[in-house]
Amino acid sequence: MSSIPDAIVNQDAKFLTDNAKRRKRLSLWFYFLCVAIALISVVILIVLMVSIWSQGQSRLSTDLLTRAHSELEIERSGMWPAILGSLFVCGTCAVVALPLGVGTAVFLEEFQPTNKLLRWIHGFVQLNISNLAGVPSIVYGLLGLTVFVYMFNVFGQIRVNESAGMEIMGYKHFYQVLTLEPGHVVFVPQSDPTKRQTTFDEPFQAVDPDGNPIKISIWTPGTPKPSDPAIRRQTVRAGAIGGTITERNWYYFRLPFDKSFLSGGLTLALVILPIIIISSQESLRGVPSSLREASMGLGATTWQTVRDVCLPAALPGIMTGSILAMGRAIGEAAPILVVMGAAVAKSSGPKHLMDDAVTMPVLIFNWAGRQQDEFKELSAAAIIVLLVILLLLNSTAIYIRHHVQKAQS
Amino acid sequence: MFLQITSRPMPLNRKRAIGCFALVSSLLVGMVGCGSKTETSTTESSGAVAASNLTGTIKINGSSTVQPIANAVKEEFAKLYPDVTVSVDGKGTGNGFKLFQDKETDISDASRPIKPGEFEACKENGVAFIEIPVAYDGLTIVIHPKNDWVDTLTVDQLKKIFVGPDAAKKWSDVDPSWPNETIEIFAPGTGSGTYDYFREVVIGKSEDALRNDMNLSEDDNVLVNGVAGNPYAIGFFGVAYYEESKDKLKAAKIVNPKDEKAYLPTPENIASGAYAPFSRPLFIYVSTASLPRAEVATFVSYFLENAPSLCERVGYVRLPDEIMQRGMKNLDEENAGTHYIDAEGNSRSGAVADIYQPENLIK
C-alpha cells in the first residue's frame, strides 16, 4: 500500500479532468506558438517581396534584360552581361564542385578505412570539412585571390606592358600601329614575344584585321602628307611605336587565371564544396545498409556497389543539397568582389576563358549604393530578375530530380 | 528478385547522370560561343558606323568616386572604338595606387593626390606616371530650410559641431545667440570616401574620429529626409546629390579660411576654388609605359577632351579650361611626375589651380 504514490491513491475525478484540460491547453498554446514562428519567416519574406516588387516593377523592361550598365542613360541601363556572367561563374562552379563534392562524400562514406593511416586521413578530412562549412565566404574570397588569381606568383605576375603570365593556348600577339588615318590601325604579327614594343622606320609588311597582308609605307614628317584615305591607311609615321595586343580565341588559356570568371567560379566552388559534401554524405548514410550488403554478398566490388546501388539510391538527396548550394553560389557577392572586382560597366558576357565578368549580386550591390534614384529602382528590379532566374534554375533541377526518381522506382 | 528490380534501371540512370553532366557542360561551352557571337555581331554593326579598327585592352582601377566618370568616358569611347576593351574597377584610391605600383593597371583613378609613400613605391618599381586632374567634387553642408540662424559656417564651428565626445549638444553651445535646441546630425557612413574627406578637412591629419552619436547612413536618401524632417538638424554629402534635393534643403555658406568670405557650393564657386576647403579635384594617373600603346593614348586624349562635359552628366563639376589645358599639355609632352609633393617629400595642399603648375612638377 505504501509503495503506491499518494497522488494515485487520492486521485479524484475533478483533479484528473482539470489536469488533462490544463495539459491540453498548454499543448494548444505551443501549437499556436509554432504556427506563429513559422508564419514570421513567411511574413518577412512576403514583406520583402512586396517592397522589392513595388520599388522595382516600374523598371522591369526589355532594356533591363538586354542592355548593359549605362552611366549616361541610366533609365536604359540593363543587366544582360551580369546575367551571362552569373551563368558562366555558376556553371564553372557547378562543373567543379559537384563531382568533387560527391566524390569526397563517396570516399568518406563508402570506403571505410582499413588501416591506421587511412583512418587518420579520414578523420582529418572529415574534421576539415565540418570546420570549412562554417567559414565566412569572404575568407574564401581571399583564398581564391592567392590561389586562383595570383597562383602564388608561381607562373609569373601579370603586368601591363611587361608580361601576360604563362600563356598556353588560343592566343596570337600583334604589334598595333596607328596609321596616318585617325582611328585606323594595322597589325604586325609578333615573332619575339618578349619584345613588347617595336619602332617602325622602314616600310614593312602588315595585316589588316581580316588577316590579309598589306604593304605599309613610311611617312617622314616634313615631306608631303598623303591625302587619300586609302593611302593614309597604309602609311605610318616614321618612328611609330607598335604596342602589343593579343588576339584571343574562346579557348585562350593562361596561368595564373587573374580576375577571370574561372577564378570566380573556382572560388565559389570552394565556398559550396563543404555544403555539397555534407549533404551528399547525409543522403549516402540514408541508403539502407541491407542494399550494400546484398550487393557485396553477390560478389560486387566496392566500386560496383557505389556505382550501381548507393549513388542511384542517394541521388535525390544529393541533388537537393546541390540545388541549395547552387542557390547560395548564385547569390554570393563578397568573394566575387574580392576575386573579380567590381567592373560593373562591362558591356558583354565573357568572350574567352580568361575574360572577366560582372555577376548579378555585384551589379545589384553597386546599383543599390548609387546616389541616383533610378539606380536604386534598377537594383530592386535586378533583384526580381535574380530571384526569377534562381527559381527557374531550381525548378529545372527539381524537375530533373523527379525524373530520375521516377525512372528509379 | 531484388536484383532484377534494381539492376535493370541502373544503366539507364548512369546514362542519365552522364547525360545531365554532358548537358551542363555543353550548355557552358555553348554559352561561351554565344557570348562571343553576340559580341562580334554588335562589333560589326557599330564598327560600320565608326570605322575604327583600334583594338586592345585598357585596365583602370582606383577611386569609386571617379569610377562613374571613367565609366561614362568608356561608354562614349566604346561607340567610336568598339573593339577596345576598357575595364573600369573601383577598389578605392589607395588600393588603386597599390595595383598601379605593381603594374597591374594602365590608369589609376584617384579622389585625392598621390601620397609621398605611394610616390616612393612607384619610383622604386619604376612606374612613371602623368598626373591629370579631370573634375571637381564638392561637399555640401546642408540644413533645414526653416533654419534662419545659420547663414555661414566656419571650419571652427563645424569642428565644434562634429568633433569629439564633448562636441556641441545644442545649437547654443556653438553660438550663444543660436536656439537652445538639440542638434541632430546626419552623415554618410564611416566607410565612405565622403566621410573620410570631411574628417580630413575638419580634423586634419590626426587619427581622431568624428563624434559617434551621429545618424550614419550609406543611403543618401536617409540623410536628405533626416535633415528635411527636423529644423534643428544638420548633415553633409556630395554636391551632386544636393543638386537633386535643392527644394527640401538649404546649403550653408562656408567661410573660406583664406579670404574670410562665405561661399555657397555653386558650380562656379567650386570651379573657381572659392568654395574651400570642401571642394576637391579628382585625378587620373596614367602610366607612361602604357602611353606608347595606341589604344591607351587614344583613350586618354579622348578622356581629357570629353571629361568636362561627361563629368557634369554624372553629377560632378567641370574643371576650368585652363587646368584641362595644362593636363593636356602634360600628356602631350609626357611630363611625368606629381605636383602634389614638394622637393622635401611632403604633400602640398591648396587649390588645384595653384598647385597644378609646371614649376611644381617633381619627378
Image: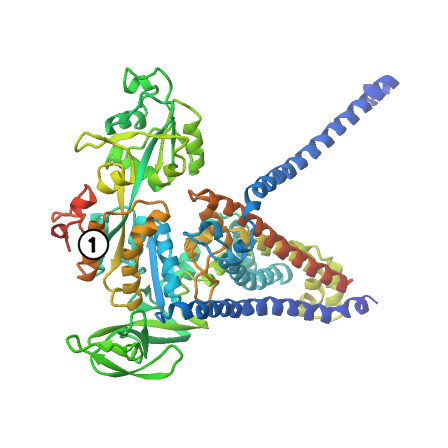
In terms of image quadrants, where is residue B8?
bottom right
Compared with A205, A363 (above or below) is above
A22 or B55, which is in the foreground?
Answer: B55
Compared with B340, A281 (above or below) is below
Q: Which residue is mark 1?
A: B325
Image quadrant holding the N terminus of chain B, namely bottom right
Q: Residue A149: give x, y in percent of width and height.
A: 40, 61
Residue at 31% from the left image edge and 25% from the top image edge: B161
Task: Pick out the residue farthest to the right.
Answer: A13
- Left or right of A172 on screen, residue B17: right
B327 or A45, which is in the foreground?
Answer: B327
Compared with B31, B246 (above or below) is above
Chain identifier of the residue bearing label 1 in the image: B
* Residue A307 appearing in the image: yes
Q: Residue A367: give x, y in percent of width and height.
A: 46, 47
- Left or right of B348 on screen, residue B61: right
In terms of image quadrants, where is residue A19?
top right
